Amino acid sequence: MGVLIAVLILSLWASHLAYLLVCVEVSFAPIMLIQVAIQTYLYTGLFITAHDAMHGLVSSNRTQNTIIGQSATWLFAALSYSRLKQKHHLHHRFPGEEADPDYSTGSQNFWRWWFSFLKNYVSWWQIITMAIIFNVLQIWVNQFNLVLFWIIPSILATFQLFYFGTYRPHRLPHTEPMMPHRARSQNGSHLWAMLSCYFFGYHYEHHESPQTPWWKLYQIKNNNQ
């Protein structure tokens, strides 16, 4: 089931992006914002897929699991899967502590924390790679389409992932119910949890049961209520 869901997300991301880049003419119409929102959500899905791969949850076949995880991180923004995996496991080992690469001990300010969060994962090699791809794609694709539908959604997805998967769950104060993971879960319906960040807002549940794939986290949430 994990492979099927992963392939579905990757296919939706690729097909929708191809449609936007080739068939859509950029304008000021409200539909443009809807298309950007959809593509942002699919970008977030790419990262969530890679995240599950880091936990070995996409496929029981180790090679297949790694290939899907690497594909998802590469498509997201030429990210290093191995680097992400190493740092993510440190996050699980030291959540909300100084040794947690996703946590900001220097400032709880949203923008400073987001910037320090991003610095851990963005490299010059990645930026150069994305710049090369952008310039090559310009041979066939309108520059405005690339910016609006390829670059902006990937940046917006980092905010979505950071806000629902790091900032809200792990920010201070760290209360007793959040222990030992220093993580809280979002309130609201399962529909909102799915729309906001693929159930990743159920973050205490994820830390409590990292062997549970994202699409089953709502079940753990139900058991905790």
Image (spheres, grey):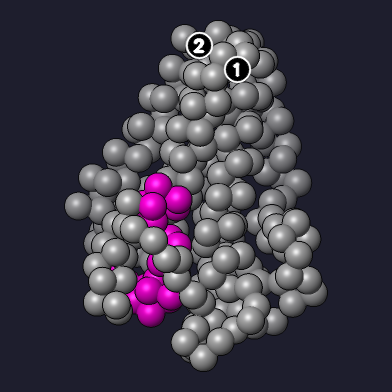
Residue nearest the viewer, comparing 208 with 53: 208
90, 200: nearer the viewer: 200
Which residue is located at x 78 percent, y 71 percent?
107
x and y percentages locating residue 138 in the rendered image? 65, 15
6 versus 162 height, above or below: above
Which residue sits at x=39%, y=56%? 193
> Regarding mark 2 in the picture, which secondary structure is present there?
loop
Q: Name the residue located 58 percent from the left edge and 73 percent from the top edge.
A: 170
**Residue 56: image x %, image y %?**
34, 64
Q: Which residues are magenta?
A: 192-212
Question: Label 1 sits on what residue type?
Answer: Asn
Q: Of residues 115 and 83, which is closer to you in this image?
A: 115
Point out residue 37 in the picture as x, y percentages from the top left corner: 51, 33
Calculate the distance from the C-alpha at mark 2 to the C-alpha at mark 1: 8 Å
Residue 112 seen from this side = yes
Q: Residues within 10 Å of mark 2 (few under 14, many from 20)?
A: some
Relative horizontal placement of residue 90, taking residue 101 as reference (left or right) = left
- What quarter of the picture does the C terminus occupy? bottom left
Name the residue that disc number 2 marks. 24
Is 211 positioned to the left or the right of 123 in the image? left
Does 76 sit above or below residue 87?
above
The amino acid sitting under disc 2 is: Val
Q: Quadrant of residue 30?
A: top right
Nearest to N terminus: mark 2 or mark 1: 2
Q: Element under label 1?
A: helix
Relative to 144, say whether 147 is above or below.
below
62 part of magenta stretch: no
Q: Is residue 57 left or right of residue 33?
A: left
Numbered label attached to residue 145: 1
Q: Determine the residue positioned at 73% across, 70% down.
A: 108
Q: Is residue 198 visible?
A: no
The reply to whether callout 2 and callout 1 are in contact (CB within 8 Å) is: yes
